[in-house]
Amino acid sequence: MSGAAGAWLLLGMVVCAANIPFVFNRVLFVFRGRDGGSKSFGWRVLELLMLYLAMGAMAMQLEVRNHGAAYAQGWEFYATTGCLFVVFAFPGFVYRYLWRHAVPSDGASGA
């Protein structure tokens, strides 16, 4: 795989990974919540951080594989990529918290 194709594939995976915490209701993608309902916003932020670190490790591995060594980065790089990861998570946040979901009808509306 060429470097450009790998970068586009990684970018697509990062966009998908950023939205995963807002799509699934299982805590850490495995456990159900205490009440069986949806997980709290804190769990979603923790999962977002974990996925950011996993995608960063994957990107670093891709860089080592293509260039032989990973370039040293300062805090500015991690602040920028962290903010970009949060921006990529915005569609999932909108879907979970801002979009009005239709309430299933029981057929007793009388209309």
Image (tube, helix red, strand yellow):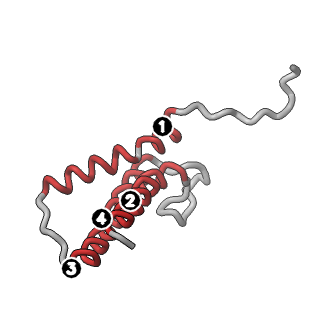
Whole-angstrom CA distance, mark 1 to mark 4, is 24 Å
Which circle, 3 or 1, is nearer the viewer? Answer: 3
Above or below, 41 against 55 in this view is: above
For the point 51% across and 63% down, the residue is: 29
Measure the C-alpha gap from mark 4 to mark 3.
17 Å
Looking at the rendered image, the disc whose residue lies closer to the viewer, 4 or 3, is 3
Q: Amino acid at mark 4?
A: Gly
Give the amino acid type for the residue marked by disc 3 in the picture.
Answer: Gly
Q: Secondary structure at mark 3?
A: loop
Image position of 35 with respect to 69: above or below:
above
Foreground tag (2 vs 1): 2
Please tell me how crowded label 2 is: few (under 14), some (14-19), or many (20+) other residues with Cα within 10 Å: few
Which residue position holds label 1? 94
In this rendered view, identify the residue nearer to me: 23 or 73. Answer: 73
The answer to whether residue 101 is left or right of residue 51 is: right
Q: Which residue is mark 3?
A: 68
Write down the residue under mark 2: 8
Q: Residue 31, how many percent across, how many down?
A: 54, 64
Residue found farthest to the top: 111
Task: Determine whether, in the image, residue 75 is placed left or right of residue 95.
Answer: left
Q: Is residue 63 above or below residue 91?
A: below
Q: Residues within 10 Å of mark 3 (few under 14, many from 20)?
A: few
Decide which of 15, 42 is in the foreground and name it: 15
